[in-house]
Amino acid sequence: MKKLVYEIELTKDISVLLSHFALRKRARHRQLRELQHLIQRRKHVILCGDFNIFDGLHELEDFIEECGLTIVNTLKDVTFPAAHPLKALDLFLCSSGMKIEDLRVLHPKASDHLPVLLKVRI
């Protein structure tokens, strides 16, 4: 089970949390519950990483609602596998009300996932 979360404080009110979620659904749900406690203690959050939600975005619905987050990516922002992307596994979830300016999937093939670039106005 992956247990690592990086936190970067952009300002005193905005944190970026980066995580790599487990492959097993039950383990991912435990990770999301733990992250929920972290997120609810912060004013604004950008949560990003490899969510490994192979069954689709519906797996995150309760978490998103409870944390007041919005999914920035769409299902067309596919990132995995990099050679012939079919799934949107690499996501950005942001606190509601954050000013999103741009989101792009980049296409260098240096990994099994394509990188995603998010531009937010602070």
Image: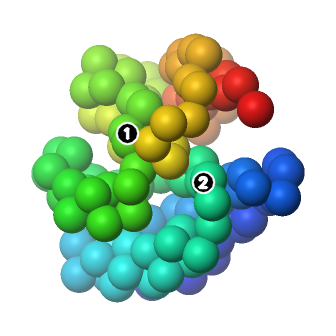
Does 110 sit above or below residue 9? above
Residue kind at label 2, given as amino acid type: Val
Please report the residue visible at 43 percent of the width from the left and 23 percent of the height from the top.
Answer: 83
Q: Residue 38, position in %: x, y? A: 57, 77
Q: Is residue 46 visible?
A: yes
How far is disc 1 from disc 2 in space, using C-alphas? 12 Å
- The quarter of the displayed image where residue 89 is located: top left
Please report the residue visible at 39 percent of the width from the left and 63 percent of the height from the top.
Answer: 67
Q: Residue 60, position in %: x, y? A: 26, 57
Secondary structure at numbered mark 1: strand
Secondary structure at numbered mark 2: strand
Does 107 sit above or below residue 7? above
The numbered dot on residue 71 is 1
Left or right relative to 88: residue 55: left
Q: Is residue 85 visible?
A: no
Please report the residue visible at 27 percent of the width from the left and 58 percent of the height from the top.
Answer: 65
Residue kind at label 1, given as amino acid type: Ile
